[in-house]
Image (tube, helix red, strand yellow):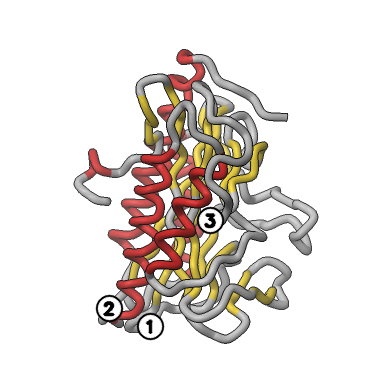
């Protein structure tokens, strides 16, 4: 069921969005060559506890997950792009890292993801990250009353295809509110002018994610981590936004912290 939020409810979602933004900025600042993925998860868990927030991941067990996730943040590295289950791995020079984080504060959920390189970056990794970020910015700009879900999807795909990347539509954006994953689904490819009409009060997590040379995924033995089928690297950018009559509000905006 698609739910529309009142202006007061959107305001009530701001603390969750701010906390998610602050946490991702903190984790990115603290993550470097040699940082262990389990240490990132522990740090995120500590920040959640201090804030009195609630993890959306630790008990999460959808049909596509082998078991409850058991951690509080997704840490996807290099050819892993989604749902990366933290494990005992120390980051190496040049690793491409995606952090995906969702919590509830006072019962309202926010969800966001960032990708970055630790140490010395490859040009092709920076280009991939840039494409996901530009696709996200364009998707947000298209999230206005009067457009449709297909307009967002078409916008994301247009930027990806222009930069030479293929699109997987198995996983994409989604509604956000009292739960992390709600209706509607927002695929990263679609036809302009089609799909659910965008209305004031609709809250969405928009999340372009692309792989360098494929659109096919394989699942790790951990039952969660999704990797490219050909070993090429992936990147992921995500914000939670609210659609209003005055335009989209980015609830997980990090610009107030001096970061993108």
Residue 201 image point, x, y percent = 52, 22
The answer to whether mark 2 and mark 1 are in CB contact below 8 A is yes
Residue in front for this viewpoint, 225 or 202: 202
Give left or right: position of 35 versus 79: left
Q: Which residue is mark 2?
A: 119
- Which image quadrant for residue 224? bottom right
The numbered mark at residue 92 is 1
In 3D space, how far apart are the residues under numbered discs 2 and 1 (Cα atoms)?
A: 8 Å
Residue 188 image point, x, y percent = 54, 55
The answer to whether mark 1 and mark 3 are in CB contact below 8 A is no
- Which image quadrant for residue 226? bottom right
Q: Residue at x 67, y 60 (%)?
A: 170
SS at mark 2 in the image: loop
Residue 234 image point, x, y percent = 48, 72
In 3D space, how far apart are the residues under numbered discs 1 and 3 (Cα atoms)?
A: 19 Å
Residue 185 image point, x, y percent = 64, 44
* Neighbours of disc 2 within 10 Å: few (<14), some (14-19), many (20+): some
Q: Residue at x 47, y 13 (%)?
A: 8
């Amino acid at each position: 069921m698609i739910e529309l939020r009142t202006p007061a409810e959107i305001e009530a979602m701001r603390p969750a969005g701010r906390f998610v933004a602050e946490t991702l900025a903190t984790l990115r600042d603290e993550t470097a060559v040699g940082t262990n993925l389990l240490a990132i998860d522990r740090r995120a868990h500590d920040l959640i506890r201090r804030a009195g927030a609630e993890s959306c991941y630790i008990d999460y067990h959808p049909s596509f997950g082998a078991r409850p996730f058991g951690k509080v943040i997704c840490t996807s590295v290099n050819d892993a792009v989604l749902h990366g289950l933290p494990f005992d791995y120390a980051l190496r020079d040049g690793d491409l890292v995606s952090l995906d984080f969702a919590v509830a504060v006072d019962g309202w959920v926010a969800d966001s993801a960032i990708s970055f390189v630790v140490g010395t970056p490859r040009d092709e990794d920076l280009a991939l990250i840039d494409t996901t970020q530009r696709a996200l910015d364009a998707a947000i700009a298209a999230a206005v009353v009067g457009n449709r879900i297909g307009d967002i999807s078409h916008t994301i795909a247009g930027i990806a295809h222009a930069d030479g990347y293929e699109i997987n539509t198995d996983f994409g954006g989604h509604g956000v509110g009292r739960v992390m994953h709600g209706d509607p689904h927002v695929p990263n490819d679609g036809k302009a002018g089609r799909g659910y009409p965008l209305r004031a009060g609709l809250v969405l997590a928009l999340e372009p994610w692309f792989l360098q040379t494929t659109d096919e995924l394989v699942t790790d033995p951990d039952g969660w981590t999704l990797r490219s089928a050909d070993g090429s690297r992936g990147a992921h950018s995500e914000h939670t936004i609210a659609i209003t009559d005055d335009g989209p509000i980015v609830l997980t905006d990090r610009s107030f912290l001096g970061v993108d």
